[in-house]
Amino acid sequence: MKILLSWLRELVDLPDDLEQITKALDDLGLAVEGVEQTGESVPGVVTAKVLRTEVHPDAAKVRRVYVDAGDGVERHVWCGASNMDAGDVVALATLGTKMPDGREILKRGILGIDSEGMLCSTKELGLGEDHTGIMILDGATPLGVPLNDALGVQPDVLIDLDLTRNRPDAWGYVGVARDLAAHFGTALHAPAPSLVATGAERVAPVTLVDGERCPRFTSLVLSGVQVTSSPRWMANRLEAAGMRSINNVVDVSNYVMLEQNQPNHAYDLDTLGGGGFRIRLAADGERLVTLDGVERTLTATDLLICDANDVPIGLGGVMGGEHTEISESTSVVALEIAYFEPVGISQTAPRLGLRSEASARYERGADPYAIEVSAARFVELLRETCPDLIVHAGWVDARHDSLRPERVTTRLRLSQIERILGTAIERDTVRSLLDPIGFTTSTTDDPDVLEVVLPSWRADATAEIDVIEEVARHYGYDRLGKTVPNSIVHGHLSPVQQRRRRLRELLLGLGLTEVMPNPFLGEDDLARAGLPTEALRLANPLVAEAPILRTALRPGMLSTVAYNESHRSTGVAIFEIGHVYPPSGEQLPAEYEALAVAIAGAEAPAAVSVWREIAAELGFGCRLDQGIVPPGMHPGRSASLTQGRTVVGIVGEIHPAVLAEFDVAERVAYLELDLDIVLGAKESIPQAKPVSRFPSADVDLAFDVPDDVAAEKVDKALRQGAGKLLADVSLFDVYRKPGVEGTRSLAYRVRFQAPDRTLGEQELANARQGCIAAVEKLGATLRG
């Protein structure tokens, strides 16, 4: 929100020191983002009349413009804009002028023809934001005079405020002035005109079909309107605020919105179908061309302003329709001022990508009870250019039961102020802080309690805590001091937080680097990673190319490996701990925390080793089930980690086809875990076992195993067959005999050891035979 200091001074008495004003705004929570000097004159810029314009056959993008700067000398200027005609008065930067952006106007030729100056837009002169065309002045403006003298522009200051959403009133000058008046203890000079009918009854009827979305809609008929240019002072202020001056009716509408924080719209009553308004929700697929010339496809959640014939003429609280503009022939106006429910506006505007000055105010909460003052102010300002303006009797004020009451009260306890702020503030001081900003206080029988009437322009203030915030704001946060709260409860990490911290320290100790890829994915990232493509799509993504909410960490991890490899950093070993959002069939996704580990240039055993380190550290066990091959993983080198029927994670290698999709040339060992399960599980405390003093014996066994029997099942069978004498089992060789299909040879080294004796030959033979018998039940055969 940009505030012009001269305009603000009309509403409140302020000190001369600008720094004192900006500090006060900061202290009040209206953070000053920047201060800009405006209206500084540009020496060398004078008024000039366009004599004629010509199009050069060899210069398609520029026109030749001949001007007279009041000295009778015809000057030739090349100009890229085309919005001027013969007789228009324009701003001419003569040769030698130094423009605000640092350019110096020199003779420069096109096609060998020199340009003797430059015609300027308001943006080039630092007088506004409009750069769509050359600045056109009133036809009666004298020629050859400095531009600022002709416009009556004086040096001014533009203060840029960064407003939070809980200050809807500060989107209007009166709201900012009210806060400053209370801060400095000066008077507030807010306009307060009265609306008085001066003509016979003439109405524009209003029908509220969907009043929950528009609790109040008013209309007022004005005749005797003459559409002309605005007073220069008004145009200057609007242009300084970044608004292009259009005509007196539209400019007054914008001026009232900026000053009173009350959007409004003026319709040509003679072209308004049925001479009235109908407010309803749109039908799915209904279309409307808005003022910006774009056709919008609407849904049943969008609110329409229609004429009495039910033809849409505007998008309620956001923007008018294409054919609702005031024209030069307009003589009777239907002024509409309404209050729209904020949540609906905050959904419609971003969904359509249509942000406007009106929607910014309505979605924060306008004042439904400032409509009369705003209408009276509109009439007062329009009369400056329309002296014969008639205000017709028959003010239409349509209200719905959902309109919040004008008077809402709450109890304010002085003891609660002290508890929240840590400072005791006397009752009279509290009242002196609240009354000037519209929080009207009155005493009660209880000396600790004040009754407070909440102002209608502060939709954010609904309870006692909101009033305490206002006390703190105007008392001054720097006066509250600093206190450290005492607590008998000591801060500590929860068990899950402790286990997460141990997990992160373990992974860093294993030489892995933590990464944090973008949690949003592109349209095809899930498919490229070999994952199901069903996912939640963001309606308003931060980046248009990444509208998908990730369902797994894998796409981000592979993108990180690919990026490093493309920069000649191979063999990266990385991990991420983050949340994923798989769709659940409900309104909200099945969000959970996950861990992903990717080791480039490594095979599946590297990922299994990381898993075993994690399992040992966290006291958590799982079974490696090669019968369940996760999507996008290598079918012969991957497994699921399961507990019963619950899949806890995956481990193995990324499928070569997936690696090719991400342009990764290295093999990638990969591990992924559901940390909600792993970190939330009760830790299994390892039991200490005595170390045997007796020698162990190793037996090598090789089996021909069918391809459909997983090595994990053979490992499990060996452990069961060995019984209590087993010390260790390890797979040390995998061999496929040429020409033999359907089987492969798995060679294991089985270590036997007893805790209390040296094993004899017969015991070893029995244990060996038990292992062989257990594996042969799987359909395997012992190799000779």
Image (spheres, rainbow, N blue to C red):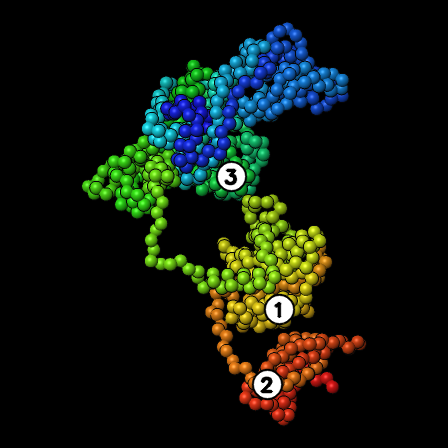
Please tell me which residue is depicted at 43% across the width and 29% down the height of the picture.
19
- Toward which corner of the image does residue 442 lie, by quadrant? top left
243 and 421: which is toward the camera: 421
Position above or below: 749 against 203: below
Residue at the disc numbered 1? 608
Q: CA distance from mark 1 to mark 2?
A: 26 Å
Is residue 342 rendered to the left or right of residue 643?
left
Circle nearer the viewer, 3 or 1: 1
Task: Specify whether residue 375 is in view.
Answer: no
Question: Which label was assigned to residue 753?
Answer: 2
Please tell me which residue is depicted at 66% across the width and 84% down the height of the picture.
699
Give, as a three-letter code, the residue at label 3: Ala
Q: CA distance from mark 3 to mark 2?
A: 75 Å
Give, as a three-letter code, the residue at label 1: Val
- Toward which corner of the image does residue 370 lie, by quadrant? top left
- Residue 228: x and y in percent read 51, 17
Question: Which label was assigned to residue 349?
Answer: 3
